[in-house]
Amino acid sequence: MNIDGVELIDKKISNDKRGESWKIFESKDIKDFSNNEIFLSLSYKDVIRGMHFQPFPYGQKKIITVLEGCIEGVVLDLRNESDTYLKIEHIDFDADTPFSLLIPEYCAWGYHAKKDKTLVLYNISGQYHSNYDMGIRWDSFGYEWKTKTPILSERDSNLITLDKYIRR
């Protein structure tokens, strides 16, 4: 991976005559991860969600797992002290991919749903603080999304640009 702290976490998959069972992660395998929130997002084809994060000192680690569909996931490193500051990592994965994605604190995360009814599971460490829920506008940091017809929320359309975030 190009960004320090971004990791692939192998799913431990068990099969038998009933089907499959996935163990997405064990907290003992991820340093300083306490699962404080779990949520799902359902997206239609060409929805872009992101790029979301919470700034210092309210960072949140995220474990992203695709349960249905397929995504183009994007991470932007916003950690000033990082050797990978402002680097971009992207990865395509789906429900059949044998891993989840760990995103470190203070990195912005977003994704493009490549199929209808894409279901994404978020396991989040750290407390949510609505006053510090921030984001970088999807088209302001030099990444070429693989869609010509993006569908965005009003909130995501109005996030600040990367340049404005850096200058603040």
Image (tube, rainbow, N blue to C red):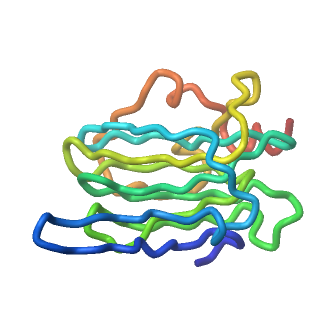
- Is 9 rendered above or below residue 163? below
Percent position (x, y) of residue 163? 74, 44
- Residue 24's quadrant in the figure? bottom left
Percent position (x, y) of residue 80? 86, 58
Percent position (x, y) of residue 135? 64, 37
Image side of residue 129 versus residue 70, left or right: right
- Residue for point 75% across, 54% down: 78
Q: Which residue is farthest front?
A: 17
Camera-side residue of 9 and 51: 9
- Residue for point 61% across, 30% down: 159
- Is 68 rendered above or below residue 85? above
Q: Quadrant of the N terminus?
A: bottom right
Image side of residue 27 versus residue 119, left or right: right
Camera-side residue of 75 and 17: 17
- Residue 11's quadrant in the figure? bottom left
Q: Which residue is farthest left?
A: 17
Image side of residue 153 versus residue 167, left or right: left
Percent position (x, y) of residue 23? 42, 65
Q: How many marks?
A: 0
Camera-side residue of 96 and 27: 27
- Residue for point 29% across, 43% down: 46
- Residue 56's quadrant in the figure? top right
- Residue for point 80% across, 39% down: 58
Q: Quadrant of the C terminus?
A: top right
- Is 19 rendered above or below residue 119? below
